[in-house]
Image (tube, rainbow, N blue to C red):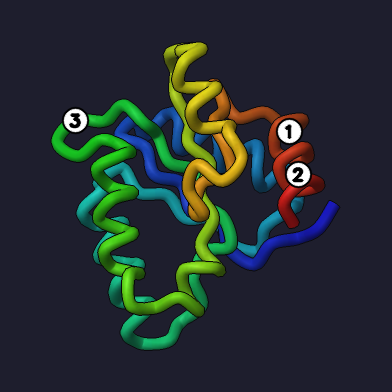
Amino acid sequence: MKTLNHIMLIDDNEADNEFHRIVIEKSGCANLVQSFSNTTEALQYLKTSIESAAPLPDLIFLDILMPRTDGFEWLTKLKALLADKPDVKQKVKVVMLSGNYDPVMEIYLNTPNYDDLILGYRLKPLTGQMLTEILEKHF
């Protein structure tokens, strides 16, 4: 399995972030795992990284259902941030996560070319097997 430099977790549930961090760290597939429970802070981190030419996360796991800013709203803000940065945009990849199974959402988000940032939709919790499948398929 390929080792990524940086995986970012964005979920308002800190317990989910911690569990997912443990799964990722146990797999040994990332040099750095960073989590945010606040979507504004996560977006600001990415903005600062882009402005300073710091390395960006190779993969972002983004919760869909969050208060204030849900996953889709956050993704819209990210796309606006990357609008005039096509070289940066192609480096950022997102897997949408949800604790609630929605077959329509699964079809919608797993459709090829739905969005060039989204690699797909997965049901929480993230497992080692899911992680392996994502990495083998996309990296």
Q: Which residue is mark 3?
A: 67
Q: Secondary structure at mark 3?
A: loop
Amino acid carrying label 2: it is Ser
User: Where does the image place residue 24, in percent across and percent down from the top left?
Assistant: 65, 44
User: Where does the image place residue 6, in percent across and percent down from the top left?
Assistant: 58, 63
Label 1–label 2 contact, CB within 8 A? yes
For label 3, count other residues whose C-alpha is less than 10 Å away and answer few (under 14), some (14-19) or many (20+). few
User: Where does the image place residue 9, in percent across and percent down from the top left?
Assistant: 46, 46
Query: Sequence-wise, which precedes: disc 2 or disc 3?
Result: 2
Q: Which residue is at the far bottom?
A: 52
Does residue 27 appear to the left or right of 64 in the view shown?
right
Q: Which residue is drawn at the image coordinates 67% and 47% (left, top)?
A: 25
Q: Secondary structure at mark 1?
A: helix
Amino acid carrying label 1: it is Gly
Residue 51: mark in rendering: none
Residue 127 occupies quadrant? top right
Q: Nearer the viewer, mark 1 or mark 3?
A: 3
Gap in angstroms between the C-alphas marked 1 and 2: 7 Å
